Image (cartoon, rainbow, N blue to C red):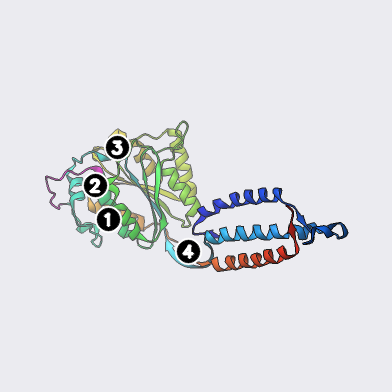
Amino acid sequence: MNFIAPLLLALVPVALVLLFLHVRRSRAFGHSQVSTQKDLRTFSLIGRLPIFAFGAVLMLLLIALARPVVPELKQFQTLETRDIYIAVDISGSMTSEVTDPNQAALAGSSNTAVNQPPSSVTSSTPVDPAKKLNRLDVAQKAIEMFVPLRKGDRVGLLYFDDEAYVSWPLTTDLDILLKYNKRTNGYRGGGTNFQGPWKNESNYGPIQTAIDNFDDLGQAKSKVIIMVTDGEANIDPDRMADFLEQAKARNLRIYVVGIGEGWVNASSSTGDLRKLAESTGGKIIGAGSAAEILAGMAEINNLEKSRVEVAQSTSFKDIFGIVLLLAIVFGVVYHLSEIFVRKGV
């Protein structure tokens, strides 16, 4: 059972306390004439009936006000799919201005090239020189290209800096992901945490967060994490080995859309994430080329699909009326019992 207004249930313990205090202040008799009590047998159960009935009325009215609903129907759909999490870096370094001309051209382009084959795509769209683009602009553009190509797959979206934040769980509704992606270049985060939780790092990073979500909700045999990041953070060698072990057990591959000059120049600051991705069977996808992005997506398309059953919709039945009817029934019981039971004063 679920409740539309569950906060109203907080009044239940208050009502129980008031009811208890009321009982302590009163005692019940077995007949309406006090003078006859010495000659009549008393029944404690009957004597307590009014307070029980009144308590039931009170509880049922509070439950009714909280608007209880029960699941009535769940529709399922069987899909041939892969499970994919897109993890977007929103750390402070991602706000740096883009100096690589190819990445700037990609971010400034209005053409997502969704329906074009990789060989026909170029990133030569002119860019307004007065517009300064940062790495988050490039990330937003890359996701804008990725998501429409994932039709048939279940895709989730998360953001991360010092810790990971799940923006949307695995879904086949790609439009909702594109809606959230429009906010990407407006985020401003702190540091970068790939490996958490680990040793003295308690916050969860994007990799472990995605793995845990796959464990909770993932059903497909092929699982993919797409990291959209400048990669400027280290991964402890022991944690690296742990990630690789978890990836192997789950048939998980990590792909990295490398943003920033570090990936263009093969900087050592990006080495750990590059090693992790390639060791899982994934690859590095340069964000400066639309053709390279689409080619990377084509590689993901070759991964094995599996049949999964996902819930499409669940309807709920409002049982407010039933609970209210029960409250009325107990109200009648309360008033009838008051005829035969008189409270002491």
Q: Secondary structure at mark 4?
A: strand
Between disc 4 and disc 1, whose residue precedes?
1
Contact flag, marks 4 and 1 (Cβ < 8 Å): no
Q: Nearer the viewer, residue 188 or 68?
A: 68
Q: Amino acid at mark 4?
A: Ala
Q: Position of residue 61 (x, y in %)?
A: 57, 60
Residue 95, visible in the rendered structure = yes
**Which element type, helix, strand or loop, lies under badge 1?**
helix
Name which residue type carries label 1.
Met
Indicate which disc, 1 or 2, sits on the residue closer to the N terminus.
2
Q: Of the two numbered discs 2 and 3 on the same chain, state the one appearing first in sequence.
A: 3
Q: What predominant SS class does the magenta segment belong to?
A: loop
Tell me: 222 left or right of 67: left
What number of labels is visible? 4
Disc 3 is placed on an element classified as: helix
Q: Which mark is residue 311?
A: 4
Q: Which residue is mark 3?
A: 92
Using residue 327 as the reference point, say whether residue 165 is left or right of it: left
Tag 2 residue: 137
Residue 154 shows which numbered tag? Answer: none
Whole-angstrom CA distance, mark 1 to mark 3, is: 24 Å
Task: Name the foreground residue: 184 vs 197.
Answer: 184
From the viewer's perspective, is residue 284 above or below residue 42? above
Report which residue position mark 1 lands on: 145
Do labels 2 and 4 touch, CB within 8 Å?
no
Point out the stretch of residues depicted in magenta: 124-135
Residue 48 image offset from top left, x and y in percent:
74, 57
Kind of residue indicated by mark 3: Gly
